[in-house]
Amino acid sequence: QKILDLNLPFDIVWLIKEGVGKDCFPKQIRFTDFNSNKAVYELSTAKVIVSNIRIGRQARAGWNKKPKQKYIQLWHGSLGIKRVETASKVFEKDSKVFASIYSFIQYDSARTDYAISNSAFESAVFRSDLLYKCHIFEYGHPRNDVFFYPPEKQKQIKEKVYQKLNLARDAKILLYAPTHRDYGGYNYGYFDAKKIQKAAEKKFGGKFIVLIRLHHNLKHRSNNFFDFSDFVIDASNYDDMQELLLSADIAITDYSSCIFDFMLCKKPAFIIANDIERYNNVRGFYYGFEYTPFLIAKNNDELVANIKNFDSVKYQKGVDEFLKSKGCFEDGKASERVVDLIKDIIANKA
């Protein structure tokens, strides 16, 4: 979007899965099927490659970065509590899985020229656990610039969310966005949407609608986990998570790093998870929940109590202290910095 705003003469190609709607993208972008041979061609002929995931399928299909190409990795999480990649305890307990994934991580990391970080904490994780030996620029994450947009632009995004999800304009949004489990056994029955909705309305006033946003690995099974209704809406297929976060008045998760993006809004955020010990044993945490500004619940009653006892002043102070402790650099200008980097690459200055 920043490239288009600046009217830069770049041919922008987006690799997208077949069947995914394109109406959310600017019209100036070209599309190529993510799984096609054409995707390998586009990757092989691009001057700059930007991704927020590992480029694996295309590498196995024949893509190998050329010396003059530059690969920028934005990554898809930030400040998250759960361990990632080589730090995950999952790999400690299964040597075969670790061996297969480790070689792939090495392959992709070795071809990455620049990684974009939003904090000193994340930069350290990039080095140690994602195996990046490339330049790491602490620019902030472009996806989080949305939280720093001027009020009128934020209002337009919220209007888009309400319109696409057909939400009553006078309703507030409570967003529940749990992550996946490496050990499966999904059961979100411990989240009572009706009870939590009523608690939010009593504490914060107004009418609330609960949006459910499942991890992309699970969104096709959303109807198996929740009984959707007029006040519980499935938002798992909404195309932009940051727009949902921006529009939400309250966010709730278990271990998803989305909550660490949402905290930039300084709006109320809560944790509910009934398997903290097991998750820590299987996946592992970088730090304890007690070091976050979030109130933690293991069941609905505890979550209701946390909503009732929420102290906005204490929470916002906790957010500021947490971001400072992690060395966070988010200021709403990440897109501008990344585009400057791309311009330097195009001009052969980087």
Image (cartoon, helix red, strand yellow):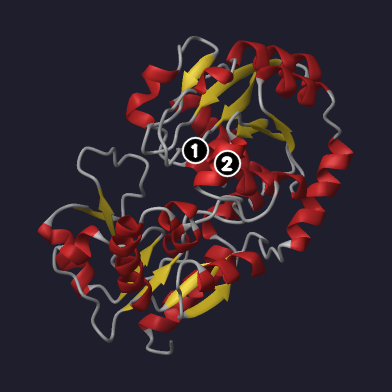
Where residue 210 appears, x then y in whole percent? 57, 20
93 left or right, relative to 120: left
Residue depicted at 42% across the width and 33% down the height: 238
Q: Quadrant of the N terminus?
A: bottom left
Where residue 349 appears, x then y in whole percent? 43, 90
SS assignment at label 1: loop
SS assignment at label 2: loop
Provide the residue designation for mark 1: 179
Where residue 209 appears, x then y in whole percent? 59, 18
Provide the residue designation for mark 2: 255
Question: In which quadrant of the rendered view does residue 22 lie?
Answer: top left
Q: Earlier in the sequence, mark 2 or mark 1?
A: 1
Residue 103, which numbered label? none
Residue type at tag 2? Tyr
CA separation in Å, label 2 and label 1: 6 Å
Residue type at tag 1? Thr
Where residue 343 appears, x then y in whole percent? 43, 78
203 left or right, relative to 121: right
107 left or right, relative to 258: left
Question: Residue 268: in sight, yes or no?
Answer: no
Residue depicted at 46% across the width and 67% down the height: 130
Between residue 274 and residue 330, name the one nearer to us. 274
Is 52 situated above or below 195? Answer: below
In the displayed orientation, state which residue is furthest to the bottom. Answer: 349
Callouts 2 and 1 close, C-beta under 8 Å: yes
